[in-house]
Amino acid sequence: MSLLTVSDLRVHLFTPRGLVRAVDGVSFALEAGRSLGIVGESGCGKTMTALAMMRLIPTPPAQIVGGSILFDGQDVVTMDAERLRALRGGDIAMIYQDPMTTLNPVLTVGEQIAEAVRLHRHDGRTAAWARAVEMLKLVGIPDPARVASAYPHQLSGGMRQRAVIAMALACDPKLLIADEPTTALDVTIQAQILELLRRLQGELGTAIILITHDLGVIADLVDDVAVMYAGKVVEHTAVRTLFNDPKHPYTRGLLNSVPSLETRERRLRTIEGTVPPAHAMPAGCRFNPRCGQVRPECHDREPPLVVLDNGSRAACWALS
Amino acid sequence: MTAPLLSVRDLRKHFPITGGPLGVRTVGQVKAVDGVSFDVAPGETLALVGESGCGKSTTGRMLLRLTEPTSGQIQFDGVDLLGLGRTEMRLRRREMQIVFQDPYASLSPRQRVEDIIAEPLDVNGLYDTPAARRDRVIDLLRLVGLDAIHLRRHPFEFSGGQRQRIAIARALAPQPRLIVADEPVSALDVSIQSQVVNLMQDLQEQFGIAYVFISHDLAVVRHIAHRVAVMYLGRLVEMATTDELFGAPHHPYAQALLSAAPVPDPDRRRTRIVLTGDVPSPSKAPSGCHFHPRCPIAQAVCREQAPPLTEVSPGHVAACHFGKPFPIPTGG
């Protein structure tokens, strides 16, 4: 049985300008100890999908209107408040783009980690503090005993993100959700954090869902990738297959748009047009106004995710 | 080589750190930019790359004197900009424009697109009749891939990519010879980013505009720049043609920076140099070569003396005590 099975998840936003189907029938599964990247551009629903895993979506305006999220055999969508509290920060932990979203500026780093440990693992104060220092050491912070007594503002951006990772992993979660964890960091620090996440995943066996817009980060860290466009998964496959044999026209366009470090082309390839406004999605396939391979059926019916001959799943009429 | 359009020599910006009981005494200095020199030829793109706090944006702002340099020289078209008075400088800015990173912050939400783009025309009196003003704005909109129907709209009605096109149209309005572009595509999604990069290249070909392109995104720089200058903590550490810098980086920092850039290729995972430590704060820049605490090949001399920029091959300069590129151990 998979650690996490998401089936036909739907998150709608009820806004004054109309209904927005932010997540519209997303399904995927994640095995224990594996990593899944969810990649897509602004507004594709990747963050809403991640927040739904812990039922953290802001209600109102957003609401889970359908589907199920089976984590360890229990449905998060229908879970009661008490069980949900144990889940959040316990079995599932989350890290965000900006570490200061997570860190409390008036508590020391060690106090914050120890607080989570006492809550979820029911350790005493001394044991919880020792655990905090141990975790800071694990994430490669030099002089962890001193840093445990430091306030977040005394740390650099890279060190803060390490501290947040230490806090997230302190209670041995089975699943870590990382939403753009390196986007706010400089590239040499980003390389350090990615290496850290990769090492920790190997050592601790934590499953990871990585949310990002950066295909380079995806290529660096995960086993499988789901590409989202306008609230839907359009392609889901192993990371090597995605980069070596992308199938969906949107995936191909996205990969083509990334300038290469190795070669210099005269012009960058682009995806024409922009993502349509959320409350005015086209009928049929949502990518059809920007797609170079449109067929008549693309305007009428939404393509389902189907398995292709290379093992990928993609939602495109031109492929099925 | 033709005469440079822009010539910068030993440019410095030191910000005071205040302290003491009243917070008015100067207790130290942040050397945000510390002796930077470079030339930009007409129609050329020079990229300034580096991480947060390396001084690349401060350098960009100083080129237009939006931030006053502490010392140094900036010659634009043979004129010493730092010797100009306020009015003269304002007239000069007609020829040098700037595009900022965040098109949500750089466009006034209360102005219509027509007035936003026409502002440099208004300031410089570059039209005779209201009809001529409107025609010029429509021309500019079309140049950047927008249309006359957008004239009466407000910025909130546009996507990020379209807003950046509007900001570029405004920069183009007075027919500048130099545009300083400070992270112009960093806030944009990747499919939109490539549209804007293509647009900037088309405009350069058409009008011969020179760009100072400030960015932390090396893949974009590889694509758009003719030459690249790498900055670290206020100093230039390496400058070369783009192919030379990406093909044979000399300075250990440039090598690490290039290898740290995430590449969309899962097979490249384990071949990178991972630097230890953080970028130090510019207020506590290390002695000697600023990079020495993080440098995998640092020696005693690096702690004591700052290496000068020296030529490693024609047109390629680097500031490292070691004469040839060292093979740096890769991580993983």
Image: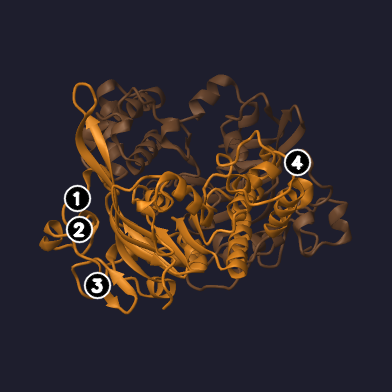
Chain colours: A brown, B orange
Q: Residue A108's quadrant in the figure?
A: top left
| Place of residue B122 in the rendered image (x, y in percent of width and height, measured from the top left) | 62, 45
Mark 2: secondary structure: loop
Q: Name the residue under label 4.
A: B152
In three-dimensional space, the C-alpha distance between marks 1 and 4, rounded to whole angstroms, equals: 53 Å
Residue at (28% x, 65% y) in the render: B252
Secondary element at image label 1: loop
Amino acid at the residue labelled 4: Arg
Q: Is residue B256 visible?
A: no
- Residue type, mark 1 in image: Pro
The image position of residue A55, as x and y in percent, is: 59, 30
Above/below status of A127 relative to A99: above
Q: Which of marks 2 and 4 is in front?
A: 4
Residue A123 image position (x, y, % from top left): 32, 24
Tell if the residue under mark 2 belongs to the same chain as the one under mark 3. yes
Q: Is mark 3 on a helix, strand or loop?
A: loop
Position of the N terminus of chain B by quadrant: bottom left
Q: Distance between the residues labelled 2 and 3?
A: 16 Å
Residue that mark 1 sits on = B286
Q: Work out whether residue B234 can be spotted.
A: yes
